[in-house]
Image (spheres, rainbow, N blue to C red):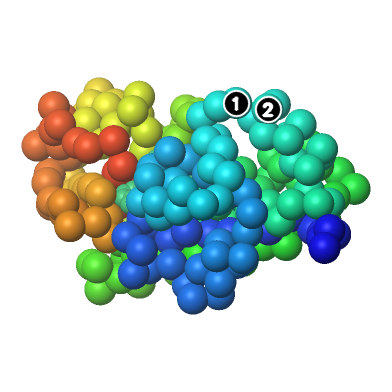
Amino acid sequence: MKMEYKHVDIVGMGPGNKKYILPEAMDIINASDVLIAGKRHLEDLSLPEKVNMEVESGLDNIVDFIKGNYENQKISVLVSGDTGFYSLLGYLQKRLEGIKLKTTPGISSVSYFMSRLNMLWHDGVLVSLHGKRTDFISVVRNNPKVIFLTDNKYTPSKIAEELVDAGIEGKRMIIGENLSYPEEKISTLSIREAVGYKSEKLCVAVIMNE
Ligand SMILES: C[S@@+](CC[C@H](N)C(=O)[O-])C[C@H]1O[C@@H](n2cnc3c(N)ncnc32)[C@H](O)[C@@H]1O
């Protein structure tokens, strides 16, 4: 029987470890014909019976594929962490106008990290340096708790370097790498110690007053 679908699922995958994927998200994944996700998530899930499409194959590709196939295949786009926090959702909403998207939340890398530190985060300021530079110097200067998403270019070391150059040192930086995975690592450093720190690719950091 030919199936007809009326929406595309956008599913939050949590920080990475399968134990942190919500059961509801897993049900949607299991019911899907096509999974569109980053290489890391597709490899971790390892579901060869699904059509797997890597986000790294190009966003135009993905948009065209969804437009051409969403009515007769159940397509899910899997994003890291939570769907509402710096995910592909915003981009897909713009490019897939007219197609219904249904989001299912996930545990954000920030939420997971704060929980590992037993730390409240409603009083933190969130800054993403993933893919783009924002002016974080004044944010750190003026706020006692600033939580960063980082990337290969804006690593904790690079952030610390710019803070030292701006004369901001009396704070500590806590770095969370590969969160939720067996190789998870959490380190607390002074800003100066963080200069030159070699971090893993998957990394968040919080900068706090001493
Ligand atoms: C495009 S953003 C997506 C954020 C995601 N929507 C969330 O809620 O966590 C990707 C960034 O999230 C952070 N990240 C995601 N998973 C992580 C993990 N397991 N450990 C450390 N940082 C992680 C890193 O800063 C990474 O560069």
Instruction: Please determine whether, in this image, residue 169 is positioned above or below residue 86.
Output: above
Q: Position of residue 135 (x, y in %)?
A: 47, 32
> Would you name the residue on which mark 2 appears?
61
Q: Answer yes or no: do the residues labelled 2 and 1 have beta carbons within 8 Å?
A: yes
Circle 1: residue type: Gly
* Residue found at x 67% / y 62%: 103
Instruction: Please determine whether, in this image, residue 153 is positioned above or below residue 84.
Output: above
Estimate how packed mark 1 is, as few (under 14), some (14 to 19) or many (20 or more) residues with alpha carbons within 10 Å: few
Estimate how packed mark 2 is, as few (under 14), some (14 to 19) or many (20 or more) residues with alpha carbons within 10 Å: few
Give the image quarter of residue 144.
Answer: bottom left
Q: Secondary structure at mark 1?
A: loop
Instruction: Please determine whether, in this image, residue 3 is positioned above or below residue 48.
Output: below
> Would you name the residue on which mark 1 appears?
58
Image quarter where the C terminus lies is bottom left
* Residue found at x 38% / y 68%: 20
Is the CB of mark 1 within 8 Å of ligand 1? Answer: no
* Residue found at x 62% / y 49%: 34
